[in-house]
Image: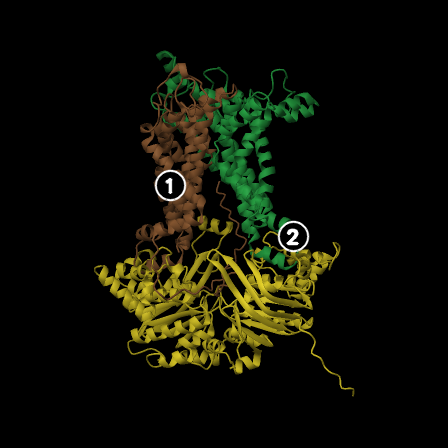
Amino acid sequence: MIRQIGKRLATAIPSLIGVVIVTFLLTRVLPGDTAAYFAGPAATPQAIAEIRKTLGLDRPLPEQFVRYVADLARGDFGNSLTTGQPVITEITTRLPASAELTLAGLIVSMLVAVPLGVLAAVRQGSLVDHACRIVATAGVSLPVFFTGLLLVYAFYFLLGWAPAPLGRLDIFYSPPPQVTGFFLIDSLIARDFEVFRAALAQLALPALTLAIFSLAPVARMTRASMLAVLASDFVRTARASGLAPRAVIVTYAFRNAMLPVVTTLGMVFSFLLGANVLVEKVFAWPGIGSYAIEALIASDYAPVQGFVLTMAVLYVLLNLSIDLAYGVIDPRVRIEA
Amino acid sequence: MTAELALAPPPLLEVHDLTVEFVTRRGTVVAVERVALALAKGETLGIVGESGSGKSVTSYAVMRILDRAGCIAGGTITFSGMDVGAAAEPLMRDLRGREMSMVFQNPRAALNPIRKVGRQIEDVLRQHAQATAGDAAAKAVEMLRKVRIARPEERYHAYPFELSGGMCQRVVIALALACRPQLLIADEPTTGLDVTTQKAVMELMVELTRERGMSTILITHDLGLAAAYCDRVCVMEKGRVVETASAADIFAAPEHPYTRRLMRATPRPGVTLRDLLPADTAEAAAGPDVARRAGTRDCGALLEVHDLVKAYPRKGAGATLQALFGRNDRRADDGMFRAVDGISFTIGRGESLGLVGESGCGKSTTSMMLMRLIDPTSGRIVFAGEDIGAVPARGFARSPLRKRIQMVFQDPTDSLNPRFTAARAIADPLLRLGGLEGRKAVGARCEALARQVGLPVELLDRFPHQLSGGQKARVGIARAIALSPELVILDEPTAALDVSVQAIVLNLLSDLKASLGMSYLFVSHDLNVVRLLCDRVIVMRAGRIVEEGATARVLSAPESDYTRELLAAIPHPPV
Amino acid sequence: MNQSARIDPAAAIPAVSAPAAAPLTAPAGLPVAAAPLARPSIARHARHVIAENPVTGIAFALFLAIAACAVLGPAIAPYDPLASDTAAALQAPSTRHWFGTDQLGRDILSRVMAATRLDLGIAVFSVALVFVLGGLSGVAAGFFAGWTDRIVGRIADTIMAFPLFVLAMGIVAALGNTVTNIVIATAIINFPLYARVARAEANVRREAGFVLAARLAGNGEARILLAHILPNVMPIMAVQMSLTMGYAILNAAGLSFIGLGVRPPTPEWGIMVAEGAGFIVSGEWWIALFPGAALMLAVFCFNLLGDGLRDILDPQRRT
């Protein structure tokens, strides 16, 4: 078992190395003078020359790379031009906001998509099945930012149920004392139900947007996987043995059907993390996505680089966890034949 | 003294006028039409037929586990006095597993891959209230012991992928018999298993069912199997029952023409190839019966194989380390798996050599090496005096010797490019190596080849999925002989074909060999077929040759114990 | 992250040799007529599939409409997409302006129609690019294995280590804010998918009987790849292309929404939604709705088309 974990960790390392190399190259690929980009549009030639020296941009490429890696190891992601603050501080402060949003969206999506897919497969050809397929096809066609805007229009402007899309918490409330950084959890820990409700109200629409976005691939995969398993030989054996429908569907079919779904979760996360950025813009959510967008508009490159690197590292770790989880639940992988 | 009127007890299962239909894209298809059968208590009934005969569908209808698209359109099914054809699903669920159960064809696929086999048996026991949570595990272990699985307490915790094919089938049998049903339906239970495993599994099934006084339905395409293990046999063709009689009667004196054709077409000792064909066709068949020329001719050996070895590195961390740091020692068994372990034989001109063995014996690897599709690890292959083993596999396509050695593949579907028409497939070797100029020349040669193999010329424009199994086999053969090769390797060419089609194809192969003067290496697991087609035979086991000699001698008076075991395991229809 | 663990519950040991059991769904007993069959043409089969599947027919018609819009675009639009008329700003949809006007008084209908060309163009070019690069390298990797496989796999894995949209952001930010770079970025992030699909298809067929037979017929490795394997891989790749068109459009729109790639005043669906986003909270819904709906319609159409294409091109169903 430990050997398995070790092997999986080993496969993550080349990916991390690749990520670091690519993020390094991205900034060096900038057309024109890299130093000028980091110095900003309003910099004087002397400022540019200084930046060039400070960042070591006049050194040969391999040396720059070593320096880059050393900086990363120390936690130095550079400084933002617009705020002057170290990028790493901004990112760590804003990360919980993005994480809370993404996780909320994912959980809601799984809670709806998986039962929907299972039901659609079990009741093939019924209303539920058709509904599932329509939801799946339509869901992948909707641009996530468009869904967000529609929800804002419907629930905020027309119905007035949702609060204004202005961030994590209405200005009247102050954030709960920081434990995890997740407002929902922290407010419960502090037993502040007012803040909990307010945070939930702000979280509802953006999380719903993300949930709708990831509903489609998960429902589609669940349905397809369940259909394949229900048509398999061993389910036929289970039926021929007279097992009750619930036992057949839950113990025999569902567990086997979930294996490919877990494998696709990696892909779903890739989409989710990307969609996160767009949703943060629509709802003015103070996460690392909106941080990157603001930096992009201001041609501030260090935060963008830090953002891409952070997201990639997170994603690699997520995939690693999924691989490990899969290795635990599938005995064929667990028992190295 | 009182004369008791011995009333025959009512049959356990009675099927009357059963019709099953399927809804497909092309409309309703009748799979089974007005089928009638009866099964007495303790009796074993065999249902025999070729593919598409409806034998499996009938049994699925009895168990009421038909696909969504299928429905019982007419007739009645009575089991133990109950009408199960129209019974409600909850009642059927109760009956399945407890009163009637089924054993399927592909044993490993029939078990839940991520659930321990012991737990799967427990599920059935507990579902039908034959065990409580407390004693279910013990009863499951007991069932495993009953099906002769060694170390059952350990094997309880095994997953299907850890067990061999034969063991998986035993587990499936344990599942089926756990609740002591009255009826067992076995749908091709031994197809896909080695012939020795086949025998062991059948013996086990027979023993357990006899011991419990169970009735059995054995569905198979193998007449020998039906003859050996069934009391009565029912023959089906295209969804109808054509004949039902006791096993002795049906094999001694079949009445229906289809049954007769089936019997004739089954390879068995004491007949010739021509005897396999339907009586009228056999007479009209052109050319004399194949006079088998024993031994080599004066021209000498066509193919000589000397100490051929193929070794693969064993998988695993140890092997990788060895490969990185260790010596490349090929002698001893240090980390190398020897698929072929030093074999030597010859094939003469115009001779037909059979290569026989069970799965894993190395016969496929041998034929791949002879075809020069993979490289041998060591040893020599000499063809017509030239050492072809020295030419690497990658470059052999360009060698002038390429066209002199060709192959007929086992799976006709897999060996034809789905996007090529039959004509294009046959023309491929002609285009590359045939030296023919122009489309017309190639087309004419294709048509000539098609005629030679008995493929109607109109079918040349069809794609593989529009052709039947026999037609695809002919396309494969036409492609193989297109360049007039001297040696043709046939890798189980008729294994995937129905027995009547097999008879035709075997005769075709024999005639072609005689008319074109080719040599054959005929790889097969079916000793009866080898008996009919081959002059000499080699028996392989675990990468080595265990016996070699003239076919007649080896198959009637084998010297090696293994050959004896193989021969004994073949179920024979009574001659 | 090679998550290539494919679960095949029916994976059986290779049988010694056995006739296949009769299929249970539709019996294979339909006898193939010996009479000559008229060679079915693609057109006839396409009509047949569309007749069976009206949804595919609708998708196809929709595709033609969108393509017409892209080609003719500005020519048939009622107003000049760039002409601003401040007096007529922020008007709701009416008979004069079917889709209303935006904050600069530009007609939204005309802008939506003009944007079709740009969005579709971006999608077509990026899909074509990735099809050639990803498809060929994937097929080569799957067929030749060895180093080719390792290199292509390494490249694909490195790209897949990033959340794809984030990588696209990074690439466009690095290379510069132009449409060409959006095309390049979209192609790069789609590369692993194409390479993986092509590789899987080639790999499955690598040891197939007909490939061995092709070697016996004297075909060299390169010829086998091009003449034997590629025609079998094409249908799956065609389906992939149609599906990725939709994704490419969404990607380009997303990048434009956050300000990358296309600059105002160029009409492009993503930018138009971004411009309309600010007005949604004050109730001027039409500015964002129509371009968003156009986006959705286009992507929906390509997804349906992909499903329909699969039916037409799969040789198993060509009768």
Horizontal side, residue A116 vs residue C276: left or right:
right
Which quarter of the rendered picture does the N terminus of chain B lie within?
bottom right
Residue B56 position within the rendered picture, expressed as x and y whole percent measured from the top left: 55, 65
Where residue A245 is drawn, which disc sits there?
A: 2
Residue C12 position within the rendered picture, expressed as x and y whole percent measured from the top left: 52, 58
Do callouts 2 and 1 mark residues in contact (Cβ within 8 Å)?
Answer: no
Residue C143 position within the rendered picture, expressed as x and y whole percent measured from the top left: 38, 50
Residue C147 in view, yes or no: no
Q: Which residue is mark 1?
A: C134
For the residue pair A63 and C19, the one nearer the viewer reads as C19
Q: Chain of mark 2?
A: A
For the residue pair C99 and B393, the one nearer the viewer reads as C99
Q: Amino acid at mark 2?
A: Pro
Above or below residue C213? Residue C1 is above
**Quadrant hosting residue B385:** bottom left
Say how many tags the image has.
2
Which mark's residue is nearer the viewer, 2 or 1?
2
Task: Name, please, the residue furthest toward the right.
Answer: B1
Q: Which chain is brown?
A: C
Task: Name, please, the residue furthest toward the left.
Answer: B437
Q: Chain of mark 1?
A: C
For the residue pair A320 and A300, the one nearer the viewer reads as A300
**Quadrant hosting residue B248:** bottom right
